[in-house]
Amino acid sequence: MVCFAQEQEKKDEIKTLFGKVDSHGGYGALTFGISKIDGSEGVFLGGRGSWVIGHGFAIGLGGTGFFNNFSYDEMLFDDYHYEGGYGGIYLEPIILGKMPVHISLPMFFGVGGIAYASRYYETWDGWDNNVEDIDEFLIVEPGAELELNVFKCFRVAFYASYRYTTEIDLINTDKDVLNGLSTGITFKIGKF
């Protein structure tokens, strides 16, 4: 009778999209990436925090700041560059996460802002620059990470992602100035 009762409990158990969740964890991450912005090299620095569900899926929040090299603008008679940032939510399926080398597929959805700014100059209280124009945008950034389990609580991931933004309206700027491929490295610390 006991075996029959246990079998009946398993049959009556509610099924979930993620199956039976045997563990929960979380991690914090720092990301360093490069990408072209308006034809010149850009740097992307970010961070994120994620909740890991059952070794196979993570959900979290993240943010990234960016800037690129200065270029000369003949209309402004000065050097300019782009700077800004974005933040939002990450959804990250993790494929074979218990293996020493595996894949994750983070998908980022967020909002951000970008500025068209001239070269920094020294003022009496520090450094400043002239922001010529600003705009906001929505962003979707799918990616793929090759992840290495270095230690039980530390992972290193090499990534490639592609940014898609809504049209950007800045002076002397293409509407798709931020769309493009990024590559970089992510350091993750936590319980996976």
Image: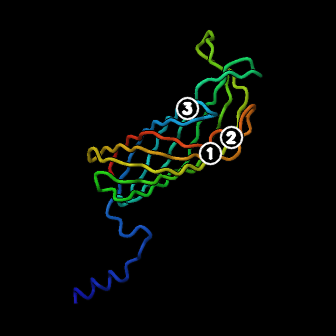
Task: Identify the residue position indicated by label 1 in the image.
Answer: 111
Position in image of residue 49 (x %, y %) = 44, 45
Number of on-image labels = 3
- Looking at the rendered structure, the secondary structure element under dot 2 is strand
Image height of 41 relative to 54, above or below: above
**Foreground label between 3 and 1:** 3
Could you tell me which residue is drawn at 69 percent across and 25 percent down?
Answer: 131
Q: Check the image and name the residue furthest to the right.
A: 75
Could you tell me which residue is drawn at 43 percent across and 38 percent down?
Answer: 30
Task: Identify the residue position indicated by label 2 in the image.
Answer: 136
Looking at the figure, which quarter contains the N terminus?
bottom left
For marks 2 and 3, give the CA distance. 18 Å
Amino acid type indicated by mark 2: Glu
- Looking at the rendered structure, the secondary structure element under dot 1 is strand
Q: Quadrant of residue 73?
A: top right
For marks 2 and 1, give the CA distance. 7 Å
Position in image of residue 166 (x %, y %) = 68, 47
Amino acid type indicated by mark 3: Gly
Position in image of residue 120 (x %, y %) = 62, 18
Sequence-wise first label, 3 or 1: 3
Do tag 3 and tag 1 residues touch (Cβ < 8 Å)?
A: no
**Foreground label between 2 and 3:** 3
Do tag 2 and tag 1 residues touch (Cβ < 8 Å)?
A: yes
Task: Identify the residue position indicated by label 3 in the image.
Answer: 42
Q: Is residue 32 left or right of residue 154?
A: right
Amino acid type indicated by mark 1: Val
